[in-house]
């Protein structure tokens, strides 16, 4: 439930009224001196209570999006009480929001110039909201807080124009998870494909179509969006694996580059290898329970995917027995045709930022330091099964889980941040529209990149 933006005002008014009420006995003290000594004792015991009350109470507001109940309970039962004990008179208030409609909510905060002191942002939002966020270097830079040096590459997502605006919680890269048993059953024995040609060949061999329903019963690769295979995040992963740069030296978009054309062509080729031409495309996989690379316990039936290009959120739970048959790899690019190709895991990071409008920047920094200590960053991520943003917090549950340990190693070696994207929301809309017309063959590959280049350039000029 969303808390009202005027909560702080109400608390201050209430505090003022309480202080006024506490002050009344002090003005009546002379009358009390005329009473018998026995009646003076209660007044004497009450006076210290009035003087001990904090001169000013504050509410530090924190706005979080879609965290697990275990995460929220831990913050409320452990972190907030510690913080409040160290800061008498300060109360921490957590509001739980949703990623659904986040843009409207945050825009409202910034337009009003008031709202939570700490807000939950996604990877690409450092450029989207950077101008509205506080420079936290005075509180969180290495000179102010030496522990900042323990954060890994995810820290870049929490910066704007080189200045820290908050701290990253976790890193959630896009990996390639593959069912080794299903690969071998399809006659594929060389492991995860290492270039574009191998992926297209693999898609043709490992995809199974039910002729009775003219729809997929097994899909070789499910990349972020199973149905379209043309999600903009998937495109970015492929593009970066070729060594592509999103912007040219002058800051203009780079969608008219050879890498952009090749990435778009690959998405189209994989779509056709899986579904066939648009005019005769088969139906998509039926919706199942759990991860698309898992299988049903009762029937033993597979959920349909051989490989999955996504974060660990879309993979099976770590205690599932199917992990004995799943490999985890980066996406390898196309080194034969693009020498600058490199293995990539595109890292997404949630982070907490402090808006410029907050009157409690130093308090916000103190809360962040507590919630992002080595031990706390480990515990926070344990409640979600994700990789801590702090390198020194990747112990315990991370080291004990073969899957998380492998993911953390790949993230450290091949991680590319999903950050620094200008007008990310507009780019997403532009790309999804153009890529949607690619798979319906309303636009050619060349027309798609030309449209994205043109529309995104215009969006940046505005």
Image: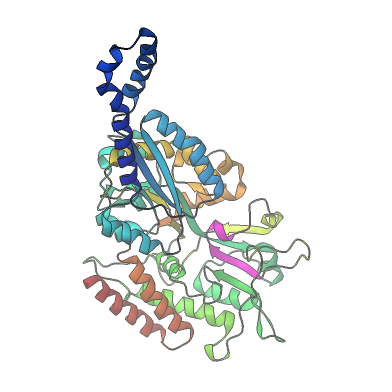
Q: Would you say residue 311 sits in the magenta stretch?
A: yes
Q: Can you name the residue that lies furthest to the top here?
A: 37
Q: Can you name the residue that lies furthest to the right here?
A: 298
Viewer-closest of 32 and 344: 32
Viewer-closest of 36 and 143: 36
Q: Is residue 268 left or right of residue 318?
A: left
Q: Is residue 448 left or right of residue 276?
A: left
Say whether residue 41 is visible. yes
Q: Is residue 203 above or below residue 125?
A: below
The residue sitting at 27% across, 21% down in the picture is 28
The figure's colour scheme reads rainbow
- The image shows residue 214 at horizontal and vertical percentages of 66, 86
The residue sitting at 42% across, 43% down in the picture is 93
- The image shows residue 189 at horizontal and vertical percentages of 66, 66
- The image shows residue 19 at horizontal and vertical percentages of 30, 31
Stretch of the chain drawn in magenta = 304-316
- The image shows residue 38 at horizontal and vertical percentages of 39, 9
């Amino acid at each position: 439930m969303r808390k009202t933006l005027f909560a702080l005002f109400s608390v201050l008014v209430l505090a003022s009224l309480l202080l006024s009420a506490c002050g009344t006995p002090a003005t009546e003290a002379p009358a009390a001196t005329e009473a018998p000594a026995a009646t003076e004792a209660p007044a004497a015991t009450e006076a210290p209570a009035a003087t001990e009350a904090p001169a000013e109470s504050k509410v530090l507001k924190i706005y979080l999006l879609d965290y697990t109940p275990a995460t929220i309970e831990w913050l409320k039962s452990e972190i907030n009480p510690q913080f409040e004990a160290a800061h008498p008179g300060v109360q921490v208030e957590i509001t739980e929001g949703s990623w659904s409609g986040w843009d409207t909510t945050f825009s409202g905060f910034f337009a009003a110039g008031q709202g939570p002191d700490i807000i939950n942002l996604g990877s690409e939002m450092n450029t989207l909201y950077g101008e509205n966020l506080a420079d936290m270097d005075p509180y969180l830079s290495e000179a102010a807080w030496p522990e900042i040096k323990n954060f890994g590459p995810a820290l870049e997502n929490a910066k704007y124009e080189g200045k820290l605006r908050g701290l990253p919680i976790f890193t959630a890269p896009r990996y390639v998870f593959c069912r080794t048993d299903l690969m071998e059953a399809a006659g594929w024995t060389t492991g995860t494909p290492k270039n574009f040609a191998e992926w297209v060949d693999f898609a043709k061999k490992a995809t199974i179509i039910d002729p009775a329903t003219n729809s997929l019963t097994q899909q070789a690769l499910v990349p972020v969006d199973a149905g379209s295979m043309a999600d903009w995040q998937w495109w970015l992963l492929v593009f970066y694996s070729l060594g592509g740069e999103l912007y040219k030296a002058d800051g203009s978009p780079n969608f008219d580059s050879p890498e952009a054309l090749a990435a778009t062509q690959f998405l189209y080729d994989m779509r056709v290898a899986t579904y066939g031409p648009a005019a005769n495309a088969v139906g998509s996989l039926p919706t199942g329970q759990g991860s698309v690379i898992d299988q049903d316990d009762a029937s033993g039936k597979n959920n349909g995917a051989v490989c999955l290009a996504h974060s660990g959120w879309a993979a099976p739970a770590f205690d599932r027995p199917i992990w004995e048959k799943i490999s985890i790899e980066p996406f390898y690019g196309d080194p034969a045709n693009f020498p600058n190709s490199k293995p990539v895991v595109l890292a997404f990071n949630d982070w907490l930022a402090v808006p410029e409008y907050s009157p409690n920047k130093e308090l916000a920094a103190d809360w962040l330091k507590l919630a992002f200590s080595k031990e706390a960053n480990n515990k926070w991520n344990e409640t979600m099964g994700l990789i801590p943003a702090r390198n020194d917090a990747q112990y315990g549950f991370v080291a004990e889980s073969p899957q998380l340990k492998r993911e953390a190693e790949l993230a450290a070696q091949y991680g590319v941040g999903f950050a620094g994207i200008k007008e990310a929301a507009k780019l997403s809309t532009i790309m999804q529209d153009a890529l949607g017309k690619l798979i319906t063959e309303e636009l050619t590959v060349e027309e798609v990149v030309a449209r994205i280049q043109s529309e995104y350039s215009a969006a940046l000029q505005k």
